[in-house]
């Protein structure tokens, strides 16, 4: 099977990101000195950024900022993007709640660490630095490369799976897939990274603000969050019902965005098959998926055993 050159490059980049993440995790777990909370928040993005920079600098094909998608868009597109993300929120909440039936909420578990960092710095790391880095990698590089070797829908799904697995836990992976699809579609509708960066900023920023507001208004509120099965079933039922309506509206907003940016035809041609989709699948892609699944399963299993035995972590 002959692989598409661009997809092969994307698969190798993703594999290098995963391997670098694992090596870094093991290394810093063995470092005797205590790592500051600020550094902890930055490290997660550096694990993505370092192999990507090496890829951009030493790769066979040089990638320009224009090729990554840093192109201007209309101001109205920014406002429509805010509406688009708002309409997708019920779907994200529903998927998050479904995942919490099986695994813990990762952000909630890490909230104590996040809240110990001063608000301004935490907001910068989570809502500004992280969206810029992650959008550049997953929508700017991976999605663009996958799109060169086949249908746009295939590129949307593959880049969303990569974005999902990158989080290395089942809880965030579940709703990250939804976000990955939504932001890749924004990339299709606008041809620019800025709307997806804005959307990512809105999601991460609102989560950060909610965490700190909870701390300031009621310090014990986060510890009292009801994550019982009955509460989760209720959340899933309510937000799934709302999402059926708002997600359809989000698609209409996406079409309006594409029309304003003169890309309606590109959005409507996403179903075109293009070249053989098998060209995107390579050993490096399968290996990276296997590593992620094994790692996430091991972490979830370990957390379950610790919690079952009443051990704090």
Image (tube, rainbow, N blue to C red):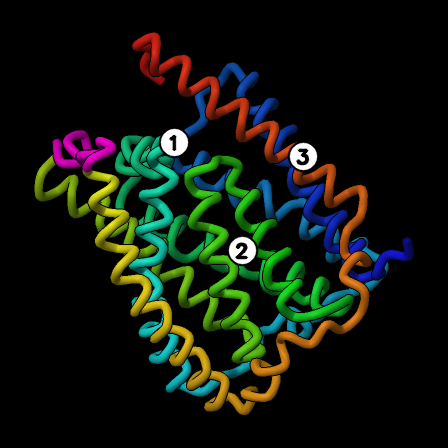
- Disc assigned to residue 290: 3
Which mark sits nearer the N-terminus, 3 or 1?
A: 1
Rendered location of residue 226, percent (x, y): 18, 34
- Residue at the spot of label 2: 133
Helix, strand or loop status at disc 1: loop
Q: Which residues are magenta?
A: 220-230
Q: Are marks 2 and 3 in contact (CB under 8 Å)?
A: no
| Quarter residue 286 falls in | top right
Task: Specify whether 312 is left or right of 180.
Answer: left
Task: Specify whether 48 is left or right of 77.
Answer: right
Residue 138 vs 76, above or below: the answer is: above
- Residue positioned 34% across, 12% down in the render: 308
Q: CA distance from mark 2 to mark 1?
A: 29 Å
Rendered location of residue 96, percent (x, y): 35, 45
- Residue positioned 84% across, 60% down in the render: 5
Mark 2 packing: few (<14 Cα in 10 Å), some, or many (20+)?
some
- Residue positioned 41% across, 30% down in the render: 36
Q: CA distance from mark 3 to mark 1?
A: 20 Å
- Residue at the spot of label 1: 102
Q: Nearer the viewer, mark 3 or mark 1?
A: 1
């Amino acid at each position: 099977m002959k692989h598409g050159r661009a997809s092969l490059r994307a698969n190798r980049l993703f594999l290098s990101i995963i391997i670098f993440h694992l090596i870094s995790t093991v290394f810093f777990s063995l470092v005797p000195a205590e790592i500051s909370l600020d550094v902890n928040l930055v490290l997660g993005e550096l694990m993505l950024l370092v192999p990507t920079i090496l890829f951009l600098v030493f790769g066979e094909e040089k990638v320009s900022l224009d090729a990554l998608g840093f192109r201007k868009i209309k101001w109205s597109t920014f406002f429509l993007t805010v509406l688009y993300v708002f309409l997708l929120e019920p779907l994200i909440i529903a998927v998050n709640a479904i995942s919490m039936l099986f695994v813990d909420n990762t952000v909630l578990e890490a909230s104590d660490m996040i809240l110990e960092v001063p608000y301004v710095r935490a907001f910068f790391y989570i809502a500004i630095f992280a969206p810029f880095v992650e959008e550049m990698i997953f929508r700017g590089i991976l999605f663009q490369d996958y799109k060169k070797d086949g249908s746009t829908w295939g590129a949307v799904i593959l880049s969303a799976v990569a974005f999902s697995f990158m989080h290395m836990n089942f809880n965030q992976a579940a709703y990250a897939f939804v976000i990955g699809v939504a932001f890749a579609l924004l990339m299709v509708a606008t041809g620019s990274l800025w709307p997806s960066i804005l959307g990512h900023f809105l999601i991460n920023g609102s989560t950060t603000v909610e965490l700190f507001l909870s701390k300031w208004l009621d310090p014990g509120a986060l510890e009292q969050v009801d994550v019982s099965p009955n509460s989760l079933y209720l959340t899933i039922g309510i937000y799934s019902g709302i999402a059926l309506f708002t997600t359809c509206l989000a698609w209409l907003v996406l079409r309006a965005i594409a029309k304003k940016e003169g890309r309606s035809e590109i959005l409507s041609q996403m179903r075109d098959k293009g070249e053989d989709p098998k060209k995107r699948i390579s050993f490096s892609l399968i290996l990276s998926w296997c590593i992620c699944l094994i790692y996430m399963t091991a972490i979830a299993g370990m957390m379950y055993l610790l919690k079952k035995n009443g051990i704090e972590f």
